[in-house]
């Protein structure tokens, strides 16, 4: 979603941090920025001591040689030689203090069930489940895939893996059987953890059924642990003898104590798949030490997290936001983190506001797409509830338009809660660009400045720093502790995607512009990645699925702007000879994408065309398709093999959607 720079910069509005924040926030001045700028290594070393308990100190804080083609990892290492256990940091150390009786996780299911796990409860459950995993043969370095709804067993399973040094790979419950299969096989998981199902908008999400379908082509999986979520009677769930085990049965016999493995700082913690510019998702590999340090620190600085807060991040743990800012960040800080299983409009459009009122939630972290839905539904829903417990708001996942920002500030935050717009990525592990609520004057629509210890810039095609107000590519000039170390099983691709465009510099794939005050304004992706309701999708991934349908000859997918979701996928299709292009076929293709990837990838529209616009060398010109879908004046068509193709397509599009739609 490329936003126009002028429209953004002309907003020119600045909101000073409310005085309550200036006076009481953990971070109240520029000292942290200054410390980090003076000596970034010493800074991260100091932060690592503050936030994490280490079993053994490091010999050196940081070492690196920029990734180059033909070289292999490790390219950079943080806290070299140090040892820690992530689960120990997130659970054990709090269970040894007064926090043992503090709520670690407050959970609510979509039908309304409640569960509260104290740090002591979490300690017990995690140890027991770690013993279960051990009994299934899981050892340090083994991969475990987790395909669960938003229930407490999900963080319990992640933390149990971390305790043993096993590498978890969480797959979002909205992904299809096939997407799950590919991720299980790519990671080489021996164990899968799932549930019979979950709830979403009153419907059952059939996780076990998807898992069974996936497992038919996952020869490496030896054991499946199935949580009985309670969406159906256990007797209705087919369990394969010897392979499938009920979570609760295994837990009955599991012993209560399980020691923590002492892990090296650079040992892997998890793999998380994200869409790239090709059809194949990339498994980002995050490591133990650096990841935890950055996530814990940013959690406290940006959300001003305190012991008395009730903190809610509305993401699904299947995405990086949930990994970092529902599980590891809050728990490492000994905070109370809220998990909600279901949809925001079930049973009514005020469900979130009811949750905030009920649990007296003080910090809310969500996505612009959700805010835009609430705007559309109207203020009456939040107005039904007492939201006075809120003191801080955050957003993530896509650029936030100033209108949505101001609506959030006014109708949810009552003009007293700072709004932190946080920019980051699955690869970056932690937030990199964000205001600090007690320090930074807020500009609606801008993610403000790079955090202390983060070195970001906006550069031109040649990698030269752009002056203020000139848009360019967003890059990071030095690694930070949480940056993903490689792509699982494909280090070459890691080098090629992130480190080759500008040698020695991390390329984000985003465009941005800095203003005269050094504030960053994010302008959207510059590659074939689209952002649908804050979820990252590759247009290539959709295309490669579509061309596998027997009726499809060629497919081109682009992202079209959408008022609520930011972007939606639109497919242009040429059909094989002799097959009629009916509305039914269009619907079938949309459904085909859903079964192959998941509901989030469903195309908003499918257009049939006799030909796709191509260059003389046969490359599909997606830029022109984007122009058509956005109703823009057509860009340069001189390189087209047949300029009439695109004109015909434009006419067809306008017939369906009206001009300029
Ligand atoms: O384009 C940027 C957008 O989301 C991309 C990263 O997507 P993903 O790896 O799925 O992680 C999302 C959650 C961290 C980025 O390349 N993006 C994320 N946050 C923002 C954003 N764009 C603008 N403003 C943001 N605050």
Image (cartoon, helix red, strand yellow):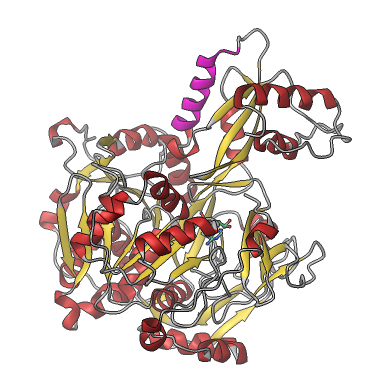
Ligand 1 positioned in quadrant: bottom right
Residue at the far top: name it.
Answer: 578
> Image check: 484 left or right of 471?
left
Q: State whether residue 580 is above or below residue 338.
A: above
Q: State whether residue 294 is above or below residue 349.
A: below
Closer to the camera in the image, 472 or 294: 472
> Image check: 488 left or right of 365?
right
Is residue 59 visible in this depiction of the protein? no
Taken as a whole, is the magenta stretch helix, strand or loop?
Answer: helix
Residue at the far left: name it.
Answer: 252
The residue stretch that appears in magenta: 581-595
Residue 33 screen position, x and y as percent: 55, 86
**270 drawn magenta:** no
For the C terminus, give its image quadrant: top right
Q: Residue at x 37, y 59 (%)?
A: 411
> Image check: 577 left or right of 213?
right
**594 drawn magenta:** yes
Q: How many numbered markers are drawn? A: 0
Residue 388 screen position, x and y as percent: 26, 68
> Image check: 647 left or right of 546?
right
Closer to the camera in the image, 177 or 29: 29
Q: Residue at x 40, y 39 (%)?
A: 219
Instruction: Identify the image quadrant of residue 176.
Output: top left
Residue at the far right: name it.
Answer: 638
Residue 612 screen position, x and y as percent: 74, 26
Is residue 594 visible in this depiction of the protein? yes
Residue 25 screen position, x and y as percent: 38, 84
């Amino acid at each position: 979603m490329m936003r126009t720079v002028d429209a953004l910069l002309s907003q020119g509005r600045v909101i000073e941090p409310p005085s309550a924040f200036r006076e009481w926030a953990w971070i109240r001045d520029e000292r942290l920025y200054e410390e980090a700028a003076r000596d970034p290594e010493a800074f991260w070393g100091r932060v690592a001591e503050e936030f994490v308990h280490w079993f053994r100190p490091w010999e050196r804080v940081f070492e690196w040689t920029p990734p180059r083609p033909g070289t292999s990892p490790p390219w950079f290492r943080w806290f070299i030689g140090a040892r820690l256990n992530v689960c120990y940091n997130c659970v054990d150390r709090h269970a040894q203090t007064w926090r043992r009786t503090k709520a670690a996780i407050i959970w609510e299911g979509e039908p309304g069930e409640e569960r509260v796990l104290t740090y002591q409860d979490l300690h017990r459950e995690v140890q027991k489940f770690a013993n279960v995993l051990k009994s299934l043969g899981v050892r340090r370095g083994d991969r475990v895939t987790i395909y669960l709804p938003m229930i407490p067993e999900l963080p319990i399973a992640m933390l149990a893996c971390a305790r043993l040094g096993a590498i978890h790979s969480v797959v979002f419950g909205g992904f299809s059987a096939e997407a799950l299969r590919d991720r299980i096989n790519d990671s080489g998981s021996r164990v899968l953890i799932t549930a019979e199902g979950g709830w979403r908008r009153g419907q059952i999400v059939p996780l076990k059924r998807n898992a069974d379908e996936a497992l038919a082509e996952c020869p490496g999986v030896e054991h499946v642990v199935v949580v009985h979520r309670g969406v159906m009677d256990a007797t209705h769930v087919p369990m394969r003898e010897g392979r499938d085990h009920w979570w609760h049965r295994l837990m009955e016999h599991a012993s209560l104590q399980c020691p923590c493995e002492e892990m090296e700082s650079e040992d892997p913690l998890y793999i998380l798949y994200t869409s790239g510019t090709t059809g194949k998702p990339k498994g980002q590999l995050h490591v133990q030490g650096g990841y935890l340090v950055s996530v814990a620190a940013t959690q406290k600085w940006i959300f001003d997290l305190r012991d008395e807060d009730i903190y809610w991040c509305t993401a699904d743990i299947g995405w990086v936001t949930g990994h970092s800012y529902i599980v590891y960040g809050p728990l490492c800080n000994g905070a109370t983190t809220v998990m909600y299983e279901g949809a925001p409009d079930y049973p009514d459009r005020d469900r979130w506001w009811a949750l905030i009122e009920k649990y007296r939630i003080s910090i809310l972290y969500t996505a612009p797409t959700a805010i835009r839905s609430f705007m559309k539904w109207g203020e009456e829903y939040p107005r039904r509830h007492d939201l006075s417990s809120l003191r801080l708001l955050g957003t993530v996942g896509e650029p936030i338009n100033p209108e949505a920002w101001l609506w959030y500030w006014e109708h949810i935050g009552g003009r007293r809660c700072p709004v932190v717009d946080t920019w980051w990525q699955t690869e970056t592990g932690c937030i990199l660009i964000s205001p600090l609520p007690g320090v930074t004057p807020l500009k609606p629509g801008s993610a403000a400045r790079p955090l202390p210890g983060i070195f970001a810039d906006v550069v031109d095609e040649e990698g030269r720093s752009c002056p203020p107000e000139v848009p360019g590519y967003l890059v990071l000039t030095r690694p930070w502790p949480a940056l993903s170390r490689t792509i699982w099983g494909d280090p070459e691709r890691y080098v090629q995607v992130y480190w080759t465009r500008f040698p020695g510099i991390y390329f984000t794939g985003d465009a941005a512009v800095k203003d005269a005050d050094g504030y960053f304004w994010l302008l959207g992706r510059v590659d074939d990645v689209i952002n649908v309701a804050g979820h990252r999708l590759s247009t290539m991934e959709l295309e490669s699925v579509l061309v596998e349908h027997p009726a499809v000859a060629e497919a081109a997918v682009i992202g079209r702007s959408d008022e609520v979701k930011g972007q939606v996928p639109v497919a242009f299709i040429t059909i094989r000879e002799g097959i009629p292009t009916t509305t039914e076929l269009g619907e079938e293709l949309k459904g085909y994408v859903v079964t192959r990837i998941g509901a989030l990838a469903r195309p908003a529209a499918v257009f049939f065309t006799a030909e796709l616009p191509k260059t003389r060398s046969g490359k599909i010109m997606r830029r022109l398709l984007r122009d058509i879908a956005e109703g823009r004046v057509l860009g340069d068509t001189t390189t087209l093999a047949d300029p009439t193709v695109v004109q015909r397509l434009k006419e067809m599009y306008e017939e369906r959607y009206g001009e300029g739609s």
